[in-house]
Amino acid sequence: MDTSESSTTEPDAATDAAAPPRRGWRRWAMDTRPLSVPAYRRLWTSTIVTAVGSQLTAVAVPKQIYDVTHSSAWVGYASLAGLVPMVAFALWGGAVADTVDRRKLLLVTNTGIAVTSLLFWVQAVTGMESVVVLMVLLACQQAFFGLNSPARNASIARLVPAEQLPAANALGSTVMQTGLVAGPLLAGVLIPVIGLPELYLIDAVALCVTVWAVFRLPALPPLGEAAARRAGVREIAAGFRYISRHKVLLLSFLADIVAMVLGMPRALFPQLAAQTYHSYGEGLALGVLFAGIPVGAVLGGLFSGVFSRAHRHGWMVIGAVVGWGVAVAGFGLTRNLWVALAFLAAAGVADMVSMVFRGAILLSAATDEMRGRMQGVFTVVVAGGPRLADVLHGTAGSVFGPRAAVAGGGALVVVVMLALAAAVPALRRYRI
């Protein structure tokens, strides 16, 4: 018997249209309308658990590698070992997500991630201490993540009405950003108490919640002729051609690349903490700098009712990227740690707005048969952009100094984004 539920979002859309406008403080609070859809609500609720659990593993792996090798270089090599399969399988996974039932693909990949976390626990609890095993497991985990992410993100457009996509993206992004803050803090508290192996086990158990939530989703088979296709190189190439022909999609990707590559200053945080903010205590300064953007993103999500109902999605992306650039430039110009935190938090709010509306554009402007591939490219851009920024800013900081590199990067974001918006009107005109 098929236990998946057959549901539709049309009744919820009709209810939403008839609902009275929110008044008072509720206008500013997070828009929770997508949670009225049972399937989306279960998926989102499971994310609350796994967002924290995944960060436990994200902390445990580099910690264990460093404990085994006493080398930060090996920690960097492990990051690369995870990045390469994630990129490759995200591109292929996007094509797969457009040709199979996305619910079944999510079941397989989430189960694979859970099993990998369990194997992390096994190697840790048995005292294996093999860097090769750790890197192979990390590569497998990231490959499953690359296959999973496009299908998961593309499924949202089949679960909630189109006008609620920004709200759904805000809900999901807020949970993930909260995990980025709470997960490492929780890992730091738990490691001395229960040890590294149990962090892996907690993540594996948390992933069972996601598997259950996916099991309860309705069937999400491909629409139209997509079911007859195979997921190969030709289909991946077709996805890139599709992006090149749809300027609003191309600009949404370029907007993120501009913001992250030119304006993500995290590689310079250690140098800034040691040289610019050392009077506050280098450890405190470093923690504040790394927490600033995620904290701002969480605040932006909690008050996403301010912007999530906007219809001019293109202008919201342009404004958010420009706001990010201004905030980063301001951060580079200040020597006061708490003013720096305020600028980074503002950048986090801008990043949340950008994520919400870029995600909505990708889901609404692309046809369902292309959504998986669009989300595959999105996963690669989101993962690869900050890593390219680390190289660029690290080099620029060595040449020009960290503050000049940060401020210059922020200014470049503003100039390049405004130039793109002026040159290509498709993004400015896009609305829903």
Image (cartoon, rainbow, N blue to C red):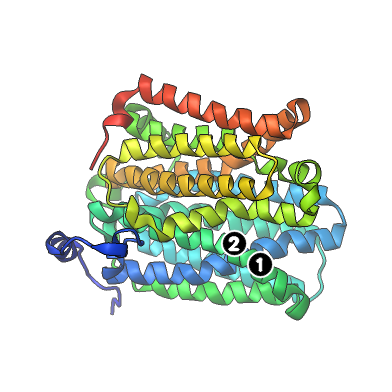
At 19% from the left and 60% from the top, the residue drawn is 21
> How far separated are the C-alphas under marks 1 and 2?
7 Å
What x and y, as percent, mark residue 257?
Answer: 51, 34
Residue 214 visible, this angle: no
- Element under label 1? helix
Check residue 175 in the rendering and tell me which mark sits there, or answer none: none
Q: Amino acid at mark 2?
A: Val
At 62% from the left and 57% from the top, the residue drawn is 140
Query: Quadrant where the N terminus lies?
Result: bottom left
Residue at far right of view: 70
Q: Which residue is mark 1?
A: 185
In the foreground, 62 or 408: 408
What x and y, as percent, mark residue 297?
Answer: 50, 53
At 23% from the left and 63% from the top, the residue drawn is 23
Establish if 44 lies above or below 306: below
- Element under label 2? helix
Residue at far top of view: 423
Q: Which residue is mark 2?
A: 181
Residue 52, quarter of picture: bottom right
Q: Estimate how packed mark 2 is, as few (under 14), some (14 to 19) or many (20 or more) residues with alpha carbons within 10 Å.
A: many
